[in-house]
Image: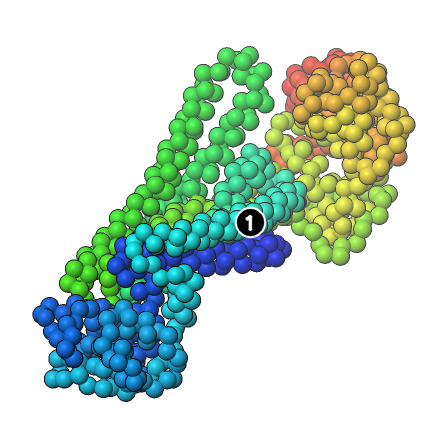
């Protein structure tokens, strides 16, 4: 549960809400205990012959003498002082020897008082208990006692004791009502007790609503913070992380995992606080009624704990697998929907459907395992608890039926109600363990994202001045995670400021990897990249990237207006400058034809624009940024020849005085460069202008004759004679 515990730091800013929720929980437990405590008075009113008043007087009289008294009907026709005995007050148990209990013995009868009144010398049990209950504390009185060890009535001097708080409260309550003479007279008392129970329930439920609102709102504020932190982490992760894991796995951690973690936090501040408080309140009342039977009923605790622990571990393992499978499911869904045109064009619907159904069935199996484990926990704990409770009930029933001291029928029923009230929260808490383990699995994936090494940022790094001299790749090597071959190997290249350099080579030769080093989308595994002699890994990252304009083959447009997409990356942009940049990228022509002009929404990923139009918007974005360094990675790949010619003219004018790196296969783009760099297998094979490379570089000639000519070049007009020993047809 380490990762789940780590996630609790997000709740700390909302500790005031949580503190108020704890106070509500405490009040709920007190009211719960009050409701349970009212069960015994209700049973006394409804079932007991002594009634509420007789019960209150008996408890108060017992406190006064430090013994347990009970009304007893002698089995024989015993006569004392010439009177027939009916109900007498019998000593069942001695509690406090410092009071009257020191002179009284179990089994003895307390018949009356020696206080100078003949009416008090021999009293029925109920009358005697009423008289003893109204005595003051620390008062010396003389009891008239008769018992097995006494052959006659003996005066026994005692000092009365004080009342316990519950018995004092019960006596106060009894005195608020006139003492009933028949069962029918008890009905008003019953109504009052029921009204009290309803009032307690209403107040408890109101506090429960407030407690749930406070705790749940704290959790969702924390979830908002977690998602914000996740987003910040995602922005700082290196590009290589997404190349390895993909975007859908990260999205799954944002949505599925955070939702499951929130469920654990809500459970922690909900059931985990309220249910234990209710269970402890019920336990306290049960212990007051009979601590022996309560402890007997709790013997199910250790085996229940072991069962919950094993089920919780299984839940954590299955939950992690389910979250991973859900991530794969989202990946398949994203691939299918984003590539729906290809899926339909190649009639691959059935294959994609089978792939989706396979992973979907896997998610189903794992979710069923989770639900089974969750469903199994409650019954396991319930069976163990019921077994222990039934054992306690059997013992309690034996005591009641055999008239054992300390437990009568009404107290037996109240005790059973308390045990039920205690085990019900425990049964609910049994499911908490599985929720926590599932949330811990989600927290592990979230914290794994947080613990992933982020882009290296040097603290207090100096800002990089605007590029004016050169860009140098010094012995640069790079290897992608999970591969065994270097994508770049010992690359050395110097590009002067203002130079236009084209990078050409077969697919996979490392061109895009090399230009990705400049904005530090990738960092070399060996070597350095220097701008104007400064190692870019040691300078402020923002100052570096603000100098770079990037246009890639896979154009990224956001669900915003065309104007907002062109001005993306600038804190403030004037509309006239945005339109001027669009004109220079030849985007203004098609934008003006749109119904909303520059205010037209382009849809998700620019879905409402053609490939060429998206590329023109991306180029306008780069122009507006006014960068010192321009990087075009197949930027002309989706533009028709006429647009390419016009954009090429604009780019030649715009790139004047700016360092430009172009990754391209287009004929016109390559020939417009000041210098061409030929790459193969992560290494530089040759550099130079077009004419020199045609004369000395067989790889370049091959690329030119195959790729460049196919995109608009005239091989016969520009092909140089083959070098010695080379085949001119290559």
Q: Secondary structure beneath disc 1?
A: helix
Q: Residue 95 at x, y = what percent?
A: 28, 77
Left or right: where does residue 26 sit relative to residue 566?
Answer: left
699, 131: nearer the viewer: 131
Residue at image x 39%, y 79%? 136
Up/down of 247 relative to 100, above or below: above
Q: Residue 607 at x, y = what percent?
A: 68, 20
Residue 261 visible in rendering: no
In which quarter of the view is residue 700 placed? top right
Q: How is the image coloured?
A: rainbow
227, 585: nearer the viewer: 227
Residue at image x 59%, y 23%? 338
Up/down of 468 relative to 4, above or below: above
Residue 400 visible in rendering: yes
Q: Residue 96 at x, y = what percent?
A: 30, 80
Outermost residue on the left side: it is 76
Up/down of 653 relative to 258, above or below: above
In which quarter of the view is residue 723 placed? top right
Residue at image x 52%, y 41%? 259
Q: Residue 65 at x, y = what percent?
A: 30, 79
Few, some or many C-alpha atoms within 10 Å of disc 1 (few <14, some 14-19, many ≥20)?
Answer: some
């Amino acid at each position: 549960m380490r990762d789940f515990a780590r996630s609790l730091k997000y709740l700390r800013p909302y500790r005031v809400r949580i503190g108020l929720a704890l106070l509500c929980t405490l009040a709920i437990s007190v009211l719960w205990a009050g409701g349970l405590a009212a069960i015994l008075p209700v049973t006394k009113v409804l079932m007991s012959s002594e009634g509420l008043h007789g019960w209150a007087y008996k408890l108060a009289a017992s406190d006064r003498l430090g013994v347990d008294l009970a009304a007893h009907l002698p089995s024989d026709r015993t006569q004392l002082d010439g009177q027939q005995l009916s109900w007498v007050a019998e000593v069942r148990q001695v509690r406090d020897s410092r009071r009257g209990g020191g002179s009284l013995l179990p089994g003895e009868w307390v018949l009356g008082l020696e206080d100078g009144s003949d009416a008090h010398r021999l009293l029925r049990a109920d009358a005697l208990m009423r008289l003893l209950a109204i005595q003051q504390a620390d008062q010396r009185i003389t009891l008239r006692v008769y018992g097995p060890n006494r052959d006659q009535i003996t005066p026994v001097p005692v000092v009365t004791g004080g009342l316990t708080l519950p018995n004092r409260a019960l006596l106060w309550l009894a005195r608020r009502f006139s003492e009933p003479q028949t069962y029918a007279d008890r009905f008003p008392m019953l109504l009052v007790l029921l009204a009290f129970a309803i009032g307690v329930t209403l107040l408890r439920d109101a506090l429960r609503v407030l407690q749930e609102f406070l705790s749940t709102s704290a959790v969702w504020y924390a979830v908002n913070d977690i998602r914000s932190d996740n987003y910040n982490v995602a922005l700082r992760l290196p590009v290589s992380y997404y190349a390895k894991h993909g975007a859908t796995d990260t999205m799954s951690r944002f949505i599925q995992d955070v939702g499951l973690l929130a469920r654990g936090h809500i459970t922690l501040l909900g059931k985990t606080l309220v249910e234990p408080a209710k269970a402890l309140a019920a336990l306290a009342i049960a212990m007051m009624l009979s601590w022996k039977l309560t402890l007997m009923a709790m013997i199910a605790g250790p085996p229940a704990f072991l069962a919950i622990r094993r089920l919780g571990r299984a839940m954590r393992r299955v939950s992690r697998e389910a979250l991973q499978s859900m991530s794969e499911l989202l990946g398949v869904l994203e691939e299918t929907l984003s590539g729906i045109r290809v899926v339909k064009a190649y009639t691959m619907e059935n294959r994609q459907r089978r792939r989706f159904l396979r992973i979907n069935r896997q998610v189903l199996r794992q979710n069923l395992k989770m639900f089974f484990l969750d469903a199994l926990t409650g019954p396991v704990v319930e069976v163990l608890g019921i077994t222990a409770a039934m054992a306690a009930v059997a013992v309690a029933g034996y005591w009641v039926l055999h008239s054992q001291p300390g437990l009568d029928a009404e107290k037996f029923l109240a005790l059973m109600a308390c045990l039920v009230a205690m085990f019900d929260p425990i049964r609910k808490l049994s499911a908490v363990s599985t929720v926590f383990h599932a949330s811990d699995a989600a927290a592990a994936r979230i914290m794994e994202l947080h613990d992933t090494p982020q882009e290296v940022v040097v603290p207090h790094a100096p800002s990089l001045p605007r590029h004016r001299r050169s860009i140098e790749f010094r012995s640069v090597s790079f290897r992608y995670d999970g591969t065994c071959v270097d994508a770049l190997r010992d690359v050395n290249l110097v590009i002067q400021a203002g130079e236009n350099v084209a990078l050409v080579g077969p697919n996979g030769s490392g061109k895009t990897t090399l230009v990705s080093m400049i904005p530090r989308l990738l960092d070399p595994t060996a070597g350095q990249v220097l701008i104007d002699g400064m190692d870019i890994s040691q300078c402020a990252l923002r100052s570096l990237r603000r100098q770079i304009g990037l246009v890639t083959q896979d154009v990224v447009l956001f669900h915003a207006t065309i104007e907002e997409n062109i001005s993306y990356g600038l804190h403030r942009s004037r509309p006239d400058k945005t339109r001027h940049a669009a004109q220079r990228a030849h985007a203004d022509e098609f934008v003006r034809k749109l119904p909303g002009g520059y205010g037209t929404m382009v849809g998700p990923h620019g879905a409402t624009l053609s490939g060429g139009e998206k590329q023109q918007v991306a180029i306008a974005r780069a122009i507006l940024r006014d960068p010192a360094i321009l990087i075009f990675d197949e930027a002309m790949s989706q533009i028709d020849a006429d647009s390419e010619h016009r954009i090429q003219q604009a780019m030649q004018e715009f790139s004047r005085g700016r360092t430009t790196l172009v990754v391209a296969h287009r004929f016109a783009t390559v020939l417009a460069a000041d210098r061409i760099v030929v790459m193969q297998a992560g290494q530089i094979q040759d550099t130079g202008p077009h004419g020199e490379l045609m004369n000395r570089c067989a790889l370049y000639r091959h690329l030119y004759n195959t790729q460049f000519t196919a995109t608009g070049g005239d091989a016969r007009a520009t092909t140089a004679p083959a070098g010695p020993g080379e085949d001119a047809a290559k």
